[in-house]
Amino acid sequence: MMQMLRTLLGASFGIWIGAAAFAAGAALAQPAAAGDAPRFQVDPFWPKPLPNNWIMGQVAGVAVDKNDHVWIIHRPGTILDDEKEATKTPPSARCCHPAPAVMEFDQEGNLLRHWGGPGQGYDWPKSEHGILVDDDGNVWIAGNDPSDAQILEFTGDGKFLQQVGHAGQTGGSSSHDLLGRPAHMTIDPAANELYVADGYRNHRVIVFDAKTLAFKRLWGAYGNAPSDEKQPPYSPSGPPSQQFGNPVHCVRLSHDGLVYVCDRANDRIQVFHKDGTFVKEFRFEPQTLANGSLWDMVLSNDTAQRYMFIVDGANEQVTVALRETGEVLDKFGQGGRMAGQFKWVHNVALDAKGNLYTTEVGTGRRVQRFKRLN
C-alpha cells in the first residue's frame, strides 16, 4: 500500500511518499519494517528555471561530481515542434529554444555550465543516454540510438578528449573495441578502469583502461561469455535467463569491490567481483513485464553503503533496499506528472548529503531532487 503526504510550508510544499513493500532477492523474503529506512521529500523548486527561454527534452542521465554539482544530459531532439516555435523565422510563439544537451547545476539549482552537440573529431550520439563525471572533472557520455556505439569523454567545459567505439559500427558482444548502444558507465579511480553497461544491443559488461581506452575484460550474466543469440521472453515463473537481456542498463561499483549490474528486462540486479566472477543476484518486482523493473540503482554514501536506491521506470517508483540481502524497506513515488511523481523514471544519482536526483524520459522529461530527511 502506498501513501502520499503533502505538506504546505508557506509558499512551498514538499511530498514524501513511502510504503513498505514485499522484499525481493535471490529468494523472495518477507517485507521489512520501514521505520529505519531513509526517507525523502521532493524539492519542487529545484532546479531553478532555465535561462534564455530554454526547454529540456527527455532527461536521460544524471551524475554528481566531487564538488556536489549535479550534471544532466537530455535529448534536445525529443522536444516537440510546438515547444520550439521561438526558433522559427520569424518566431511563431514565445516558447521556446532547446537547451544544450549537457548542463551543470549547483546545489541551489543554478545553471553553471552548458554545452553539447555535434563537432569535429567525434561522433555525438543521436540519442543521448548516460552521463558520468570522473574525479578529474571530465564528463563521459553515451547514446542508445540504433546507430550509437560509442562513448565520448570531454572536459567539464565541453572540450573533446577521446572516444571509444564508433557510430554505426558494432562487432557484437564479443568485440574488444566496438560497442553496441551503451547505456551507462562508471569508473574505478584506483584502477583507472572504465566499466560500461553495454547495453541496448550488446549483452554484457565491458571494462577499458580509462586513460588509454585499451580493452581489459568483459562478461555476461552469471559471469558467462555473453551471447547475442535471441533469448526467450522474460517470464516471472520461468527459469532465470543465463544471459543479460536488453538493455544492460546500469553498472555501479561499491567501496568493497563489488560490481552491480542492472539487467532491466529480467527484473534483477546481478553482483560480481571486479574480475567478472558472479556473486549473487536480487530480483525486484519480478512480475513486471513492461520495460523491466531495474532501470538504475545507486548505493548509499555511508561507509558500509548499507542501502540500494533503485529506480523503476515501469512501476514509476524508487525502491529502498538493503544492499547485503536485497530486502525491500520502502518505496516512494507513483505514476503521474506532479512533483514527486514519475513518468518513466530513468536514472538516479546521490550527492554527499544523501539527496537523490532522478531523471525521466518518455513524456516525463525532467530532473527532480528528493531531499534526505533522516
Image (cartoon, grey):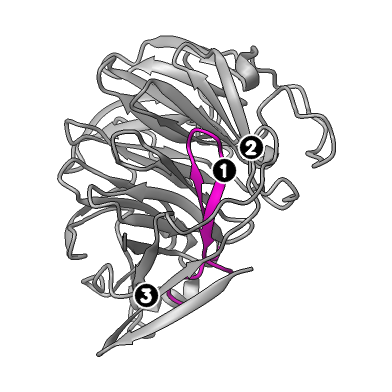
- Compared with 229, 80 (above or below) is below
Q: Distance between the Cα atoms at labels 1 and 3?
A: 53 Å
Give, as a three-letter code, the residue at label 1: Glu
Give, as a three-letter code, the residue at label 2: Gly
Residue marked by disc 1 = 327
Which label's residue is closer to the chain start, 3 or 2?
2
Tell me the mark number nearer the camera, choosing from 3 and 2.
2
Q: Around disc 3, counting alpha carbons within 10 Å, would you say few (fewer than 14), some (14 to 19), or many (20 or more)?
A: few
Residue displayed at 49% across by 30% down: 260
Residue 201 in the image, given as x and y percentages of width and height: 62, 32
Q: Distance between the Cα atoms at labels 3 and 2?
A: 53 Å
Residue marked by disc 3 = 88
What label sits on residue 139 in the rendered view?
A: none
Give, as a three-letter code, the residue at label 3: Lys
Which label's residue is closer to the chain start, 1 or 2?
2
Type of secondary structure dominating the magenta stretch: loop
Query: Which type of secondary structure does the marked residue at label 3 adopt?
Result: loop
Q: Around disc 1, counting alpha carbons within 10 Å, would you say few (fewer than 14), some (14 to 19), or many (20 or more)?
A: many
- Compared with 85, 8 (above or below) is below
Q: Quadrant of residue 53?
A: bottom left
Q: Around disc 2, counting alpha carbons within 10 Å, would you say few (fewer than 14), some (14 to 19), or many (20 or more)?
A: many
- Compared with 351, 14 (above or below) is below
Q: Magenta part of the protein: which range?
A: 318-343
Residue marked by disc 2 = 25
The residue nearer to you, when weighing 177 against 282, is: 282
The residue nearer to you, when weighing 229 against 83, is: 229
Q: Is residue 99 visible?
A: yes
Where, quadrant-wise, is the C terminus in this rendering? bottom left
Tally the marks. 3
Q: Is residue 172 visible?
A: no
Asked if disc 1 and disc 2 are in contact, CB closer than 8 Å, the reply is yes
